[in-house]
Image (cartoon, helix red, strand yellow):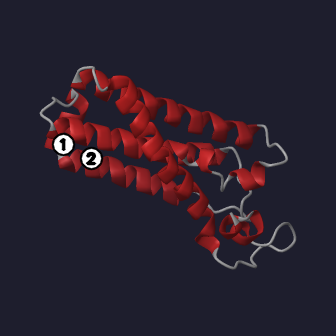
Amino acid sequence: FPFATQDLALGGGPGHEGHYAIPQAWSLTAEFVFYFMLPVIAFALYRYTSKRSHTSQVRAALWIAGGLYLFGQVFRLYFLVVEPSWARVAVIWAPNWVDFFAIGMATATWSAAHHAGMRLPSLLRFLGDHPAISWGIAALVGFSFATFSPPDTPGVYGAEYWVRWF
């Protein structure tokens, strides 16, 4: 995808950092991949769970979301700790952000299940009944993000960023 190259999104390559054309262009590739994945996952879920109970369908969707989340975390941990030659560009690849997609899938699954009359897990019910706690957790997460400094070189992250992304 020409709109999401390493040089375009990360600033022109080593020695040319800061020469951005469209800094957020990197996200288009990840978004394209996720919008492509969504109907594929929906088709697979329909094909293999349509004759099962609603509970089984929800469970299958949550297993897929959990698998994608785990894959994203392992991928990110690998490139941050091992630092392969492609680590700088891996920051803009879809696998680095698939865990965020998985969180959205799980949230949508729980929302649809609840709308269909299924009972939410006790933790989700508790957080829904106590929005001040949810907002407090969100504030703590936001504050923890504020304690990280951006990398000196765009696209170069240390292992401490895995905690932030996690």
Q: SS for tag 2? A: helix
Q: Amino acid at mark 1?
A: Gly
Where residue 110 appears, as percent x and y from the top left, is 27, 37
> Where is 72 relative to 17, above or below?
above
Where residue 97 appears, as percent x and y from the top left, is 56, 49
**Residue at the outermost right position:** 15
Q: Quadrant of residue 64?
A: top left
What number is the disc on residue 128? 1
The residue mark sitting in front, 1 or 2, is 1
Q: Amino acid at mark 2?
A: Ser
Task: Report whether 66 appears left or right of 70.
Answer: left
Q: Quadrant of the N terminus?
A: bottom right
Could one spot residue 50 in this view of the protein? Answer: yes
Q: How far is the residue under mark 1 from the one under mark 2?
A: 8 Å
> Where is 18 relative to 148, above or below?
below
Whether tag 1 and tag 2 are in contact, CB under 8 A, the answer is: yes
> Where is 88 relative to 120, above or below?
below
Where residue 114 appears, as percent x and y from the top left, is 18, 37
Measuring 47% from the left and 41% from the top, which residue is drawn there?
40
Q: Using the image as rendered, state which of residue 41 and residue 131 is in the foreground.
A: 41
Q: Using the image as rendered, state which of residue 109 and residue 163 is in the foreground.
A: 109
Q: SS for tag 1? A: helix
Q: Provide the residue designation for mark 2.
A: 134
Task: Report whether 145 appears left or right of 78.
Answer: left
Measuring 67% from the left and 65% from the top, which residue is drawn there?
4
Q: Quadrant of residue 74?
A: top right
